[in-house]
Image: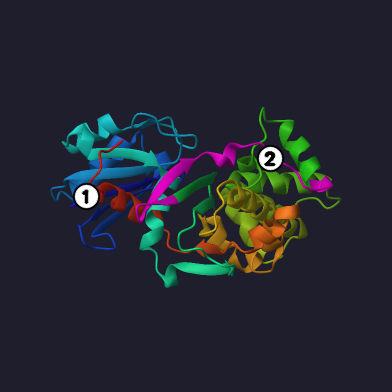
Amino acid sequence: MILAGDVGGTHARLALFDGGDKGPRELEIYPSAEHDSLVEIVETFRRAHSAPIEAATVGVAGPVSGGRTEAVNLAWPVDARDLASALELSRDAVAVINDMEANAWGVPALGDDDLVVLGEGEPDADGNIALISAGTGLGHAFATWCDGELRAHPSEGGHVDFAPRTKLEAELREWVASDAEHVSFELVCSGVGLLNTYEFLRSRSAEPEPDWLRKEREARGAVAITETGLERRDPVASEAVDLLVSMYGAQAGNMALAVMATGGVYLGGGIAPRILPRLREGAFMRAFMDKGRLSDVVARIPVWVIRNELTALLGAARHAHRAEPRR
């Protein structure tokens, strides 16, 4: 029995896995902001589910070094030593890895029902794969094949410089830069990014924000803009979703080229499944393939949307089951 975790800025998911099971035996989801530490969440989980465990791997949103992360979108750090103590396990039985690395470990556990095809391409069974997940932030990871086994690698590609491709995107960059020291792709292509994009477009619009939408946005943030935009109840919200889709496609294409992801690109996170109807309209794939002299290369790379929200948990469980030394 092992403990697997997926900890992000919005939710912390913890689960128990049996060695041979694909799905979790026990699963709990906790609002991250309502707790003072991951140790507190783990202790709460263990009071409810006390079966003996042999190992644990937790994926956390942020760069990890020496089993510790000062997570970018979390109010508290996560340290493998503290978790090992709380779980009464040896240090080498507990791993903290990047959450996107955990997602990459989970890809082999996905079935056809867990995926939606955006671009069929020509998948290479031995090719590298890339993951890019827009949610609270913009996560990146990739995986390579070594001795017949898929090996996952973390990335912080969401924090690279945002590269505008159009005059409108250049104006968006300047607008965000007025309030941010560094304009990354995450600041325009994520939940935070959607709010930034909407507010920028609203500032350019001759139409004031409707009171009903202002109240919805203040109460529900990016979710309100997403739903309103998808339903086209407000033209500015709809344009914000369209712009996010295009920028998402462009950065996914960048990631595909950066790691030569001939095995495919996977879109994870909470936003892609939610905006799937807009992704299917074509703007995402047009931006994905618009890579100049290498457009034909990118066009052969398949693209899937991951619908299984437990992918990182499945990956953390697979990581914990490996027989290699833990990080």
Q: Is residue 164 magenta?
A: yes
Residue 8 visible (yes or no): no
Magenta stretch in the rendered image: 144-168
Q: Amino acid at mark 1?
A: Ile
Q: Position of residue 309 (x, y in %)?
A: 42, 59
Decide: marks 2, 1 in contact (CB < 8 A)? no
- Helix, strand, or loop for circle 1? strand
Return the disc, 2 or 1, that comes first in the chain's sequence.
1
Residue designated by label 2: 162
How far apart marks 2 and 1 lie (CA) works out to 39 Å
Residue 84 is marked as: none
Quarter assignment of residue 288: bottom right
Give the side of residue 284 with respect to residue 85, left or right: right
Q: Position of residue 126 (x, y in %)?
A: 45, 59
Density class for disc 2 (Cα within 10 Å; few <14, some 14-19, many ≥20) is: many
Q: Nearer the viewer, residue 134 or 284?
A: 284
Q: Nearer the viewer, residue 62 or 36?
A: 62
Residue 182 visible (yes or no): yes
Give the side of residue 188 with respect to residue 24, left or right: right
- Helix, strand, or loop for circle 2? loop
Q: Is residue 291 magenta?
A: no
Q: Position of residue 3 (x, y in %)?
A: 24, 48
Q: Position of residue 200 (x, y in %)?
A: 75, 44
Residue 2 is marked as: 1
Q: Residue furthest right?
A: 206
Residue drawn where x is 20% and y is 57% of the image: 19
Q: Amino acid at mark 2?
A: Phe
Quarter assignment of residue 311: bottom left
